[in-house]
Amino acid sequence: MTGFDEGTTLDRFLLETTRSHPQATGQFVTLLQQVTLAAKMISARVNRAGLAGMIGATGETNIQGEFVQKLDIYANETMKRALEHPGVCGLIVSEEEEGPIHIPERFHSGRYIFTMDPLDGSSNIDVNATIGTIFGVFRRKSPEGEAGKLEDVLGRTGREQIAAGYVIYGSGTLLVLATRDTGVNGFTLDPSVGEFFLSHSDLKLRPSATTYSMNEGYAKLWDPRLAAFVDGLKEPSRKMTQRYIGSLVADFHRNLLKGGLFVYPATTKAPDGKLRVLYEAFPLALIAEIAGGAATNGRDPILDMTATSLHQRTPLVIGNTELVEECTAALNA
Ligand code: AFP
């Protein structure tokens, strides 16, 4: 559903789409308004990164064993600060932090559980390539007002997310938001006004597409069935082309707009793949499904998986349904 003209502000879109829910407390709108505030701050910092001494690594590694970039820290802190005080989150979990982020006792512990990869693709910062913030939202299980618990996020399936989205910091800054009621909509930041405006309404993935995105540098570490499938894609009759940025949010976004299949598979070195269930696979799988696409872990739908640990990884096959089904079938042949 849309019914909104391009150029509608994100604020108006949120207020009008939640007004129809009589049980709405306003917390969901506030949560998304805080996400957009943080996104504007991160976007401004990303745009000035080369000047503001924000390029480069801190010298530390995160829980994933990856080099932490200065902008990773800025993005994580900015999102946290925006979300912990307004009384809308019961717990926040971040790719950048080992444990869950509890809401300080002086603030109300709200209805929602927020999962985030504050700055995805951060190894691309130094080369000015597109990066992004990915997020998912669950309704909490424990009572509102009490401290959030790990069980509010672990033991949950991807299907339990009530919303997901991402912000890409590229040639422009765009926020894509998906809910089952409103579909998938993209809002572009007009930096001169400081507002996000509806620019991509009701995004849909057609059944098929002609782009595939995967890091073929690892092909010798793949399951031979995947290698054979990719070889088949190269038959000229299929008219396929390949695009891979190495920033999931950017690769996913291109495929959402233009069509395509993204695969980050299991390899002999990384049998569970690289991408994280809670911060990357769950949110993007929800967006893909709402847009009419699909996402699997090479066997089952991503959204049917259960989160068993905060930093759990999964192989990811995501994009236009026919290609996802073909790739998943090839992996199980
Ligand atoms: P960084 O945040 O360390 O740049 O990792 C990005 C990422 O998690 C995801 O955004 C990419 O799709 C994937 O890694 C790329 O990984 P490879 O370099 O192994 O292809």
Image (cartoon, helix red, strand yellow):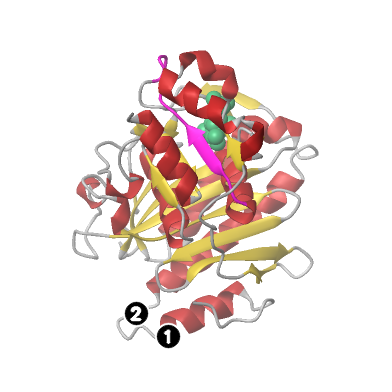
Residue 77, position in %: x, y? 52, 46
Span highlighted in magenta in the image: 259-270
Res 191 visible: yes
User: Disc number at residue 24?
Assistant: 2
Answer few, some or many: residues within 10 Å of disc 2's Cα (few below 14, many 20 plus, some between 14 and 19). Answer: few
Q: Quadrant of ligand 1?
A: top right
Residue 74, located in which quarter of the rendered image? top right
Q: Identify which residue, 191 or 90, lies in the foreground.
A: 191
Give SS at disc 1.
helix
Give SS at disc 2.
loop
Answer few, some or many: residues within 10 Å of disc 1's Cα (few below 14, many 20 plus, some between 14 and 19). Answer: few
Whether label 1 touches label 2, CB < 8 Å: yes
The three-letter code of the residue at mark 1 reads: Arg
Q: Find disc 1 in the rendering and name its residue.
A: 19
Mark 1 or 2 closer to N-term? Answer: 1
Residue 108, position in %: x, y? 32, 65
| Residue positioned 30% across, 56% down in the render | 159
The three-letter code of the residue at mark 2 reads: Ala
SS majority, magenta: loop
